[in-house]
Amino acid sequence: MSKIKIGISSCLLGEEVRFNGGHKHSSICTKELSKYFKFKSVCPEMGIGLGVPRKPIRLVGETQQPRAVAVDDSTIDVTDKLKAFAKKTVPQLQDISGYIFIKGSPSCGVFRVKVYRENGMPNENPGSGIFAKAIMENFPLLPVEEAGRLSDPVLKENFINRVFAYNAWQQLIQGDFKISDLTDFHSRYKYTLMSHNSDACLKLGRMLANPGTITIQELAHNYIDLFMQTLSCKATRKTNTNVLMHLQGYLKNKLDRKQTESLCEVIEQYRVGILPIIVPISLLKGFFHSHPNKYIQQQAFLQPYPEDLSLRNRI
């Protein structure tokens, strides 16, 4: 399998591009994810010529439209340069399937970046880094995450799941495609969608079943917009249990009493938090190996990404 292209803040790869000449090396990125991801390294502050070492910058002003200025000299304003660099960089990122940013950065932070008032105190409402915000506005469907948040098993699994799903979509629409191709894609991700939001799953199915008079390009745009919104919602033990029970239904009259009881017990232990989800999924996959079902075997829910990433062992 060819590696999936991912944008990443350069400092996370160990590149010494921080304002103080340091880095923020992420072993999760370089050791765990590099087997399947090909990183496109970007440092916007270096990209606009600030150099190393350099005066640190911070966000000031209004949360929605902050300015990026030097910490000890507000006359040094690099906001427009960062925006221009983002505009210049966008064409080079057309083929990426996700982006991992550095936490808290005034240029690359995504969540809860401090924005300071004139009196030097931070606003109650945080913002996003200038470059990161521009990238997200240009690629509104792109899965993005901060490296620091990847230490959370749920957030990490959700991000990787979205990256692989979005990459599958990108491959689907590279050439000519038909409604049947979209339907097949939806069929493959039905139970994944259900684990995130069952109502959205039904809505997406109806969207494809009754496309109306819009073009297939418009249909695809509307579909993937809601699809990615749905996957961005974290699945829960309750919603995952619902999917596990649906999958169990395909084994009705296939398993003996002891096997059925064992499967029910494992699903219940997952539901109440005793077991991670990998246990009932592994059991289901074993049963479906003995009792093949073509429709179930194609379901992304059972293997949304390579098993050796071990993302489901802790959720």
Image (cartoon, rainbow, N blue to C red):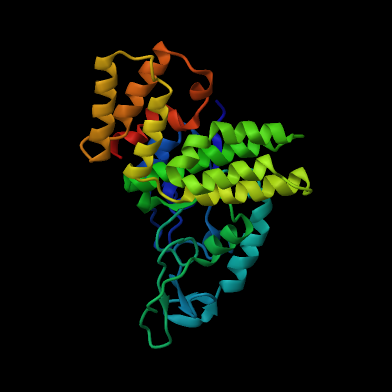
Comparing 17 with 218, the one in front is 218
Question: Is residue 37 something one can see in this rendering?
Answer: no
Above or below, comparing residue 18 to residue 184 in the picture: below
Question: Which residue does the image show at 66% across and 50% down from the upper left?
Answer: 222
Question: Which residue does the image show at 35% across and 46% down from the upper left?
Answer: 236
Q: Quadrant of the N terminus?
A: top right
Comparing 276 with 48, the one in front is 276
Q: Quadrant of residue 103?
A: bottom left
Question: Which residue does the image show at 55% across and 60% down from the upper left?
Answer: 44
Tell me where residue 283 appears, x and y as whole percent.
32, 22
Tell me where residue 89 appears, x and y as whole percent.
64, 55
Residue 62 falls left or right of residue 27: right
Tell me where residue 271 appears, x and y as whole percent.
27, 39
Comparing 152 with 20, the one in front is 152
Residue 31 falls left or right of residue 130: left
| Farthest-out residue, front | 253
Tell me where residue 152 appears, x and y as whole percent.
32, 48
Tally of marks:
0
| Farthest-out residue, left | 274
